Amino acid sequence: MKFARVGAAIAAAAIVVAACGGTANSGKTVKVGITLPLSGSSLASAGPARDGALLAIKEANAAGTVKGYTIEPVIKDHAVNGQYDAQQGAKDMTALVSDPAVVAVVGPFNSAVAKVQIPISNEAGLAQCSPANTNPDLTKGDAGKELRAKQPDKINYVRVATTDDIQGPAVAQYAFQDLGLKNVAIIDDLTVYGKGIADAFTAEFEKLGGKVVGREGADPKTTDFLPILTKFKDLNPDSVFYGGVTANGGGLVRKQMPQAGLGDLPYLGGDGIQDQNGGVQGSFINIAGPAAENSFSSVAAIHDIPDAAAFAEKYTAEYKADPGAYSASGYACMQIFIKALADAAAKGDITREAVRAGVTSGASFDTVLGPVTFDEVGDTSQKIISLYKTDMTAADGKGDWIFDKQIDYGAS
Amino acid sequence: MTAPAASADAPSARSFSSAGLVSVAQLAIVAVLLAGALLWMGPQQFVNALTLGAIYALIAIGYTLVYGIIELINFAHGDVFMVGTFLSLIFLTTLGFNGAITEPGLLALVLAGDFIFTMIALGLIGVLIERVAYRPLRNAPRLAPLITAIGVSFILQNAVQGVPPYFGFGPFNANSPQVFPTDWFVTLGNASIPVLSLFIIVTAVVMMIALQLFIGRTRIGRAMRSTALDRDAAALMGVNINRTIAITFLLGSALAGAAGVTFGLQYGVTNSGLGFNAGLKAFTAAVLGGIGNTVGAALGGFIIGFIEVGAAVAGLNRWSAAIVFGVLVIVLVFRPSGILGQQTGERA
Amino acid sequence: MSVIQDVKTSAPAPGIRDRVRGFAGRHRSTTIIVMMALIGIVLPILAAFPPFTLFQTQIGWIDGFTNAGVFVLLAIGLNIVVGVAGLLDLGYAAFFAIGSYTYAYVASPFGNSILGIDVAATFGDAVGVVFWPMLIVGAFVAAVFGILLGAPTLRLRGDYLAIVTLGFGEIVPIVFREASTVTNGINGIGGVYRPWLPGVGTFSGVDPMPYYVTTVALVAIVLVFAYRLVESRIGRAWEAIREDELAAAANGINTVSTKLLAFALGASTAGIAGVLNTAKLTVVSPDQFTFTISFTVLAMVVLGGMGNFWGVAIGAFVIYTINNVILHSLNEFFHGLGVPVLQDIDFIQLQFLLYGIALVGMMLVRPEGLFPNSRRKRELHQAIDEPGEDENTLSEVTEEGGR
């Protein structure tokens, strides 16, 4: 076993060397890091973001977008035991920072990792773009400043997803105004994301005049939600909101609602339960089964991306799979960096500072998500929340999320 | 010789006590507690607690059987249960049953087949694990088999995960067919009790009684008890120790298989990472009841079911795991050998 | 110790090797410090050359070595509890958490607001100087919790102790998660100050070298303490309890307080590791202290060689490096290759398969671990190699030993 592994490592090393020799063109090489949780159960959601970013690099290299340079991705996986790991994330960021050829980083996926990575990338002045972080504390207010303690004025972390303090209220408004729901019962999965979005939902829903009749938290490892749901039944809610992700129980709660006699109530959630169609193992609709009917979810990003069909087509051609929820976001992050790299290359030399300044200059970037600019703390100007509803007849009867509407909060 | 003295001083955890030892006073206490719980949480939550408790109890018995006979905390047992959920899933989907079966005759047939297949297959897996990972270490210090148990647990998880597009289920949630209709209810006052829950509770209780009878009344059961009491003396009396221990693993794993089937029916989902948490709770149940004692394990399982559901009823679900372990610590401080465990005298 | 004495008596004319061993035996502390200094210097140099540079940059390696050092500290601490005193602790991560939070309370704006102090105002730019005394405070606080947990539970038999510690390991993160008014809940405490040292200034998040040197020094100090303790009267008492608690008690050892001391010292080492790790990550949150950490550290102790501090330290280092560097590199490499099957294999998942096989295989073939403690090895081999004769006595003795 051990020898086989050593052998594999040597073979791997040999191929890396050969590959480098083969693909190097006349120009110089510039590296962009990709730091995501890419193994175990994290792979399903973060893998498509990586693939989106890699696709953008491949296209830019083929087209020679960054004149005189070839972009080389440096992929770092910070999942340990199949779960994102903050310590490993910090180590990967330190490693990326230490490589002078790395001028920008795409990632991370989870807010807990962003919290340890931002102080490091900020100190190094290395531009970082997250395709998926939605926790407001990463950029805004005192919490955001705390993370940028070293260089408070040099914004280096940006994100293309909008924040939960917009997403949660958006779902609340949708529930109250569009669906006419007044008494909601809430379960969260006790994680930073789940609790955060449930809190944001609660605040807005109560402000609108709705009533939160019950609020419980359930451990991500639990499979038995019947006690909570049975309790909710006595509180007579007209809907159930789940703050959390499918893997932590988002689908299971829905599946068990009929068993608790709550099957006919609408079910609401954020982007944590918005995943692939019912034919994909482990997706919300797949787990909830027929009970998934009458469920609503959101995505903290634009739905009507300008060229959705074209993007899906080239993504599928490359990876033989449909784009995931964050493929376009990963692609957009990389597009933004490629633009900044091209500008820097045109002006002279590509440096970290040139890339960072380019990304956060307030300029508008033309991305697959539409035009994107970043505000004074690095949040995207594109504050659009898309809302979805399940349709069990879609995807050849397997069920899928159907786009309902999108709300733009950018204007206000 | 030191042997008689040694065995006289360490029998406590090694003997399987039988139900006959439960006194009238103890039964009365249990009855009062149950009545109180029923009044407080209402019939529907009461049934929820019994259902959850029944599944924990079935797994906990496996821990306690193995501990009783070879004093090993079989950390892989939770994962054995997890494999059971997948065996049941494979059985049902292979036969093409993906949804509820409303025709009672067919349902009974499918369920019987599912239980028999899963329990036998998993029992054999349990025996295999014992043969490969534990038997060679039978006389080693106890930390050694404990570590192999952790290793076996990793191996089982990976075996189920496999390499997804080719074989295995990956690290994701997988749907287990709920062949028992989840929309059958018995109405009791204003509460509607799922028939499935009643089925699970009755099945579990029947199996526990059968196990007690098996241990108490059969020849093999007697061999198990004598091996637990004093392995060497039993061997001298002609008991085949290896076979008896293998049968113990067979029984424990088969019950975990039954738990796996009921779990799939109740929750309709399984996951290769399921074993850890389920095993942890079941192990806690076994210790709470007094490890080595099968009645204690069942009792512990139900107690944990009631604590978890009670936490939800009280609005403390966020603290659920902390309450379970808090109760465990408190019970052990006052009764160091668990609720039904015999006290260990000078070693306490 | 015993090995060295054997060598000395059996070889009247010692060669150079024996002389070195003899010196090492007589000057244990000096040897540890010299060895750690050597290792500390050699590792970063090695990391600058192939094949190491094929995996990641030298800085990346040094940062990885620092993280590995945290696990080495944890493994050394757990070795006192499990390897030397024979008490099975399955909730060791709880003490790691307590050390981490202790530092975060004293060295962050949020923590200060809870405690009603303001270290930033007191020390200004040099606020990170609190790191140094906090190493001791963190160790102390963790030890106090170790005693609080141990006092009522250490009289339990070994297996019950295992489940109680396991429960404690689950309870502690839940308390940090749910007592949100004083712990900031699941979001954890951020903005923790990095250490400060005269001449170095505040440690940098970009350059791991100061952290690395600190970690190497801490490992050396903890190793010296651990060896001194184990070779003292207390160490012999621990071993006596491990091998036969009744006999130890009969010989006048206060078993409860001796076990409690092992528990407290093990906890305090985890506390030190927690302070160091938090000072490096600058964030502490309840989800960092999962059961996986307790199990990983236990596996490090077992694979490295229970009872032998150098062994567990090397075991921890090797396992960490394989887990967190080599398998990840293989994953990244094969996934980038685009070959079907190979790119679908998840080496991180495979890591656990290999891990499982290694644990089972190690116990079957070499239960004493890679670098065994000589006495522990004899115990284990006695029990396994001669099961036939006098089995009762032996199995009773070893069972006691495990408790």
Image (tube, coloured by chain):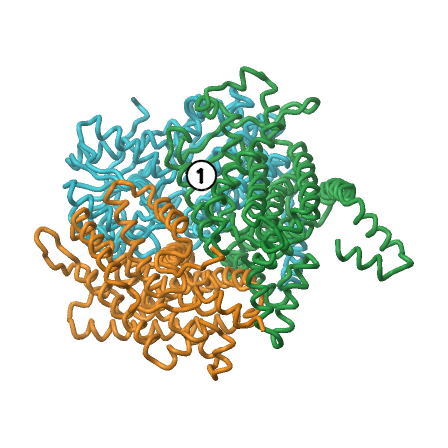
Chain colours: A cyan, B orange, C green
Viewer-nearest residue: B55 or A410: B55
Q: Position of residue A312 (x, y in %)?
A: 38, 47
Viewer-nearest residue: A101 or C375: C375
Position of residue A249 relative to residue B51, above or below, is above
Task: Name the residue: 46% across, 20% down.
Answer: C116
Q: Position of residue A403 (x, y in %)?
A: 26, 42
Task: Name the residue: 45% across, 24% down.
Answer: C110
Furthest residue to the right?
C13
| Picture quarter with the N terminus of chain B | bottom right
Label 1 sits on residue: C286
Q: Is residue C382 left or right of residue A333?
A: right
Q: Is residue A172 left or right of residue A331?
A: left
Q: Position of residue C308 (x, y in %)?
A: 67, 53
**How many marks are shown on the rendered structure?**
1
Three-letter amino acid code of the residue under disc 1: Pro
User: What chain does badge 1 belong to?
Assistant: C
Q: Is residue C282 left or right of residue B208?
A: right
Residue A158 visible in the shown view? yes
Furthest residue to the bottom?
B238
Residue C333 visible in the shown view? no
Viewer-nearest residue: B211 or B5: B5
| Residue A384: quarter of image | top left
Q: Position of residue A137 (x, y in %)?
A: 41, 28
Q: Is residue A96 left or right of residue A298?
A: right
Q: Determine whether the residue tagged by mark 1 lies in a helix, strand or loop.
A: helix
10 Å neighbourhood of mark 1: few (<14), some, or many (≥20)? Answer: many
